[in-house]
């Protein structure tokens, strides 16, 4: 599991970005969420290859 912070999340569009503790930005889609997230939430997640790059999946509030 990786850890990071929700940098941006648009609830109406259903996507956002998580900044990992290593400084990488990972795309997150609402379908990859376990918990409801908001900007600045600390989260744990796994990374999976998506159609356009890496996606955060199984995202939970830390």
Image (cartoon, helix red, strand yellow):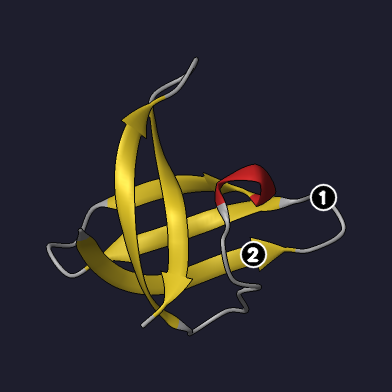
The residue tagged 1 is: 13
In the shown orientation, is residue 10 left or right of residue 48? right
The residue tagged 2 is: 9
In the shown orientation, is residue 59 left or right of residue 2? right
Q: Secondary structure at mark 2?
A: strand
Q: Secondary structure at mark 1?
A: loop
Q: Residue 53, relative to residue 20: is it above or below?
A: above
User: Badge 1, how many Cα within 10 Å: few under 14, some, many 20+?
Assistant: few
Q: Which quarter shows the N terminus?
A: bottom left
Q: Residue 11, relative to residue 39: is it above or below?
A: above
User: Badge 2, how many Cα within 10 Å: few under 14, some, many 20+?
Assistant: many
The numbered dot on residue 61 is none
In the image, what residue occupies the spot 45% across and 70% down?
A: 60
Q: Position of residue 49 (x, y in %)?
A: 35, 24
In the image, what residue occupies the spot 66% across and 73% down?
A: 36
Q: Residue 45, relative to residue 54: is it above or below?
A: below
Q: Residue furthest right?
A: 12
In the image, what residue occupies the spot 37% across and 47% down?
A: 26
In the shown orientation, is residue 10 left or right of residue 53? right
Residue 10 occupies quadrant: bottom right
Q: How far apart are the alpha carbons under marks 2 and 1?
A: 9 Å
Q: Position of residue 17 (x, y in %)?
A: 49, 56
In the image, what residue occupies the spot 79% across and 63% down?
A: 11
Q: Residue furthest left?
A: 22
Q: Residue 61, relative to residue 1: is it above or below?
A: below
């Amino acid at each position: 599991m990786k850890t990071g912070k929700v940098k941006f999340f648009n609830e109406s569009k259903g996507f956002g970005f998580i900044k990992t503790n290593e400084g990488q930005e990972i795309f997150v889609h609402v379908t990859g969420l376990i918990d409801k997230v908001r900007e600045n939430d600390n989260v744990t997640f796994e990374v999976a290859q998506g159609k356009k790059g890496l996606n955060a999946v199984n995202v939970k509030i830390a």
